[in-house]
Image: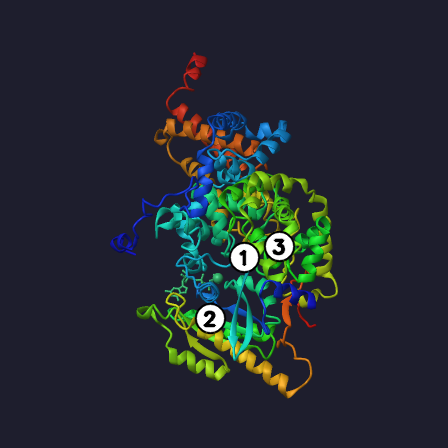
Amino acid sequence: MARRAAAWEQGGDEYDYLFKVVLIGDSGVGKSNLLSRFTKNTFSLDSKSTIGVEFATRTTQVEGKTIKAQIWDTAGQERYRAITSAYYRGAVGALLVYDVTKATTFENVKRWLKELRDHADANIVIMLIGNKTDLKHLRSVAAEDAAGFAEREGLFFIETSALEATNVDKAFQTVLAEIYRIVSKKALSSSEDSGAGVVGEGQSIQVSAGDPNGGVSSRCCSF
Amino acid sequence: MDKKKEVNDIEPGPDSSRSVDRFGFIKTEQSNSQEGVLKSRSTHERGREERRIRKWRKMIGAGGSDWKQYCRRNPHVVKRRIRKGIPDCLRGLVWQLISGSRDLLLMNPGVYETLVIYETSTSELEIIRDISRTFPSHVFFQQRHGPGQRSLYNVLKAYSVYDRDVGYVQGMGFIAGLLLLYMSEEDAFWLIVALLKGAVHAPMEGLYQPGLPLVQQYLFQFERLVREHMPKLGEHFIEEMINPSMYASQWFITVFSYSFPFPMTLRVWDVFLYEGIKVVFQVGLALLRFCHDDLVKLPFEELLHSLRNFPEDATDPDKLLPIAFSFKVLSHLEELEKEYRKRLEGPNASSSSKRLQPLKSKSMRRVGSQVLSNSNVGMATAFKAFVNSPVGPKTTHFWGPVANWGFVLAGLVDLNKPPEMISGNMTAAMCVYSGLFMRFAWMVQPRNYLLLACHASNETVQLYHLSRCAKAQGYLDKKVPEAQQ
Ligand SMILES: Nc1nc2c(ncn2[C@@H]2O[C@H](COP(=O)(O)OP(=O)(O)OP(=O)(O)O)[C@@H](O)[C@H]2O)c(=O)[nH]1
Ligand SMILES: [Mg+2]
């Protein structure tokens, strides 16, 4: 896919790695606002609910390498999983968001993990995010509980506020850095092509034109 | 919630210094420029608009009385005029006429109210959560707990009770919100019923049912249509691995009411309600055709961005719709639907069967026979289905129409009462009332036999009462003594 790389380079859009990341979690927990905070530094108090999927990118630096994050923001309502779960495939990172003021959104985290295990690659990097920490007086999920849960499940964990822009960059950066760490370790430990879910230098992962059964398969493309 | 709290909760209404466009959306910089264009419309144009409204008024008649006849006689004129856009002041009424919702409303008196007041829905919290996230930039829906938000809640809740299989799905709010800008809650509710249950066109409930089966079918069909009508772009999409679910899901799920400029949404809805879902495909194709030459050059990310942010030009209905109508898609859509079903039933169907529920066939059930003539249902085999159906005895749809039988029952009970206790005026009024309803039940499409039977029975009972009453007051007896003499 040299042609694609060339087209991107023309736009001054060079990068060493492209990582596909998904944002999941119950409706209304603040996924879209975390994304807009990270990619555009904007926040909206009355944002429309996401219908299907949305997409945004941001390029950042990790250990001197240019990483492009290609982020898919999904609709949170359960009914929409019929469409959105196709986007888990090929993702190397997932941000699983709950709302610290709504205990049910934290209880549902287990269900979301199962979704990921069913549809995403096994070695996907998962970050559990407790959002809306600015609403201090409404908090109903203790940070310790979530941290304990994350540790048991082997997830990263952070609390954020998309409104106050607290820890948002850090959340994304941590995930990207961890993915990079895995990728570079893999590259060192074996000369083979990187396995599923991990994207090598200059490679990209995208969802392909789907078949009517709703399955959208991922495909790695290399030079 | 007590009243006091509610009052405190209400945020200050929309700032009066912030102005709104002619549809009630809070103006942004962008829409300001558009408004400027509108204001500068010449008096000549305004005169033309007035003539257009007069023509439309004549076509529909008072309260829509002439509409059906006009449509039957001049279908092409109607189609042409709708494609030019329904005058905004008549839009709400005409939408109800062309969608078939007006008939549903008349046939089901009191049903909506019952759904809102007496039924509870498991989706209530979900609906509430999304209320302030639906058309947040419109004055009508802006105020917390204001009339706009309350009606939106009522309509969505009523539907989630009416059809528990569908319940509430995000995206429905935008459709309900759009309708509420043009009609009352109850009218909006029945219009959604008409669309989803298929009063005039194929039912669209599959857009929202678990597994979103119809969304998946439409996306499949759309992708193939793109390849057919714009092979170069279709090829480019394949190369860049662009899938219609990345940009077009919301086109179908909200029928262009989610993120397009309002003037375009309205004109699309005018035609969509009259001509059916094929319009959504046509408009989608037109958007792609309009930007075709740019789109084929763009790589994945820019391409996806462009597919979600069309230029102002492309969303101008007067430019877009003529392109849309130039695509002939109907027969191809049917073929593609067959092909899609075949694939579903094919060898790899098992893996997807969990996600994709079988689609109800177009001809299977139309809302008319479903809601309106309960008398068609109820045979032994169908009985169970009926009991659990959205119109079954577990629901108010059954009880709503059945309440009419109450008159008959009351009338029969009255048979035991002495005739002196019967109000002549009331009984006469009942006769006229039932007579009118009998005529209505007979004339309406589809004919409502349940209602007809009900009012025929009532008519009989009441006429009998009237005769008893008359007899008691001596009107009929007069002749007897004369004859005896
Ligand atoms: N106070 C506060 N509100 C937030 C924060 N993040 C999001 N919100 C609000 O929460 C609501 C939902 O935010 P979204 O970002 O649209 O939620 P979502 O997870 O994308 O929801 P879906 O698209 O429906 O799945 C909006 O009203 C936001 O303004 C936050 O950090 N603090
Ligand atoms: Mg969202």
What secondary structure is marked by label 3? helix
Q: Chain of mark 3?
A: B
Evaluate if marks 1 and 3 touch, with contact meaning CB atoms under 8 Å apart. Answer: no
The residue identified by callout 3 is B214
Label 1, residues with CA under 10 Å away: few <14, some 14-19, many ≥20: some
How far apart are labels 2 and 1 at the CA level?
28 Å
Residue at the far left in the pictured view: B4
Q: How many marks?
A: 3
Left or right relative to B432: residue A191: right
Q: Which is nearer the eye, B298 or B315?
A: B298
Q: Nearer the viewer, mark 2 or mark 1?
A: 2
Image coordinates for residue B409, horizontal then vertical, percent: 45, 40
Q: Nearer the viewer, mark 1 or mark 3?
A: 3
- The type of residue carrying mark 2 is Val
Image coordinates for residue B319, horizontal then vertical, percent: 59, 40
The residue identified by callout 1 is B165
